[in-house]
Image (tube, grey):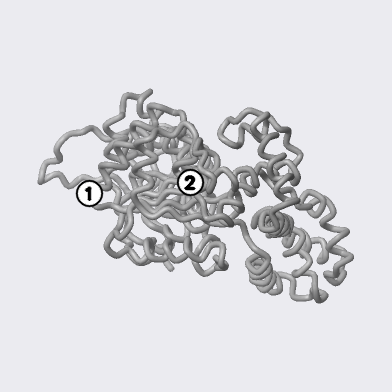
């Protein structure tokens, strides 16, 4: 491979050419990562390098400011490492003027060092995707099989069948994994599509920045010109009136254009406090899917999958029978804690040079096992009781007093007192802001019924075992 061409000025300093900028870009790719490079560096155009100043052109003011704050030092460092005498870097935005047809002078553009796929959304920044979060690495079980199937359907990229797709569930149940997996799959199946994934917090930050810099029309164009919009943790915009307003109009504009929207949150739309009713209504128009807490079989499957990957990384380690079953039974909080425990266990065993046994697991994971001793939450009790009696969770915490809802509500109150350390006023707040005397009445009623109603006693016993398992 021939060496890149170099141009030298009268003082002996190297001048930037397309080839030398390409070499700098190769180093930046290694430094900032492929996702950041594609989103932020590749759209830049080198304009000039003179008198110690390297001038670049960015497509938008937002990108100019972001790159300057987050990657300016990295670009300056790599330019200097390549032998260029650079004191500072300037980022500019092109003037909005028509380009004459006979204009042939073009600035040097940043080349794609690894021939990445051509994309049309480089000027639309979003959150980077995690390469680990794909459909292949997602372990499917009964608690998440519907969410997985719905995500797969959307990722196929065909006609929009349900809009939006709303995924919700507790921490560490796989919402973000599925969101990233959809984005990865869409990039493969529809490389020309403008797919944008970001968190609700990032959406809010960019909206506020656009307001401050009086670039609200740029913001609207940025988010209403996508083919697929994916917003993670939408509960974070609850209570933010201006952000909710803009999100509402963005949502409507994309739906009207037949564009796909995918949303995630930690609870169902109707249960997100301080979220505007009209937004709740829009979110409930599509397919709303709950990712349930993991069961034993799913946790064991996740551990087995991760263990196979770790065996290649630690080929000399052996694992005794029953270790994975022990972890799947004891660590029930969420998948992140479960995977973190397995990572620590393999690392610890490799350092001490021992077999991964039950004794080693208990010694290495003492704090995790102690913290993971079954701590039932009121929300989990409400969800499990609602499923058992086939009532809606929103009705359980709502004002309805019909017996078919009031009795399950009292059962949930009783179990909340028995299985958690929460006070009566705190339990009351979790049940729609009820007074603590109402909670006391519900608990006493169930205690009375357990002595005379065999069915209630059996329900309580079954629910207690399910919650403590």
Q: Residue at x 63, y 43 (%)?
A: 410
Q: Which mark is residue 17?
A: none
Q: Where does label 2 land, which residue?
A: 268
State whether residue 50 appears in this view.
no
Q: Residue at x 60, y 49 (%)?
A: 171
Q: 292 or 199: which is nearer to us? A: 292
Q: CA distance from mark 1 to mark 2?
A: 25 Å
| Residue 323 percent across, percent down from the top left | 79, 69
Check the picture and name the quadrant holding the N terminus: bottom left
**Left or right of 58 in this view: 334:** right
Q: Where does label 1 land, which residue?
A: 257
Q: 430 or 225: which is nearer to us? A: 430
* Neighbours of disc 2 within 10 Å: few (<14), some (14-19), many (20+): many
* Of labels 1 and 2, the one closer to you: 2
Check the picture and name the quadrant holding the C terminus: bottom right
Residue 243 drawn above or below residue 36: above
Residue 41 drawn above or below residue 93: below
| Extreme residue in the front direction | 452
**Left or right of 53 in this view: 336:** right
């Amino acid at each position: 491979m021939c060496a890149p061409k170099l141009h030298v000025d009268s003082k002996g300093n190297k001048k930037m050419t397309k080839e030398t900028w390409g070499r700098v870009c190769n180093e930046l790719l290694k430094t900032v990562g492929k996702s950041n490079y594609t989103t932020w560096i590749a759209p830049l155009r080198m304009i000039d390098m003179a008198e110690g100043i390297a001038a670049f052109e960015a497509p938008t003011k937002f990108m100019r400011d972001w790159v300057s704050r987050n990657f300016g030092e990295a670009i300056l460092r790599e330019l200097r490492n390549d032998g260029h005498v650079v004191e500072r870097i300037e980022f500019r935005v092109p003037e909005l003027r028509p380009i004459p047809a006979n204009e042939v002078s073009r600035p040097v553009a940043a080349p794609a060092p690894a021939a990445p796929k051509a994309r049309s959304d480089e000027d639309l920044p979003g959150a980077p995707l995690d390469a680990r979060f794909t459909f292949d690495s997602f372990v499917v079980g009964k608690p998440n099989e519907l969410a997985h199937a719905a995500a797969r359907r959307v990722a196929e990229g065909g006609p929009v069948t349900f809009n939006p797709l709303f995924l919700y569930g507790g921490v560490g149940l796989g919402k973000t994994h599925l969101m990233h997996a959809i984005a990865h799959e869409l990039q493969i199946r529809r490389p020309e599509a403008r797919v944008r994934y970001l968190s609700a917090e990032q959406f809010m930050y960019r909206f506020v920045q656009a307001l401050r810099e009086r670039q609200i029309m740029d913001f609207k164009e940025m988010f209403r010109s996508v083919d697929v919009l994916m917003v993670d943790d939408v509960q974070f915009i609850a209570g933010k009136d201006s952000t909710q307003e803009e999100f509402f109009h963005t949502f409507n504009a994309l739906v009207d254009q037949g564009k796909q929207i995918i949303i995630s949150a930690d609870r169902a739309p109707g249960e997100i406090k301080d979220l505007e009713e009209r937004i709740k209504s829009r979110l409930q128009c599509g397919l709303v899917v709950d990712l349930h807490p993991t069961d034993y079989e799913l946790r064991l499957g996740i551990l087995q999958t991760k263990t196979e990957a770790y065996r290649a990384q630690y080929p000399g380690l052996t694992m005794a029978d029953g270790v994975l079953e022990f972890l799947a039974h004891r660590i029930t909080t969420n998948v992140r804690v479960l995977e973190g425990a397995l990572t620590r266990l393999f690392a610890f065993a490799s350092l001490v040079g021992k077999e991964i046994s039950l004794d080693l697991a208990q010694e290495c994971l003492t704090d995790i096992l102690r913290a993971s001793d079954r701590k039932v939450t009121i929300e989990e009790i409400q969800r499990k009781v609602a499923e058992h009696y086939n009532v809606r969770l929103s009705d359980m915490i709502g004002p309805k007093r019909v017996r078919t809802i009031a009795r399950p509500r009292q059962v949930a109150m009783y179990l909340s007192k028995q299985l958690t350390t929460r006070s009566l006023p705190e339990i009351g707040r979790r049940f729609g802001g009820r007074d603590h005397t109402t909670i006391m009445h519900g608990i006493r009623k169930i205690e009375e019924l357990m002595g005379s109603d065999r069915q209630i006693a059996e329900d309580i016993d079954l629910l207690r075992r399910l919650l403590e398992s």
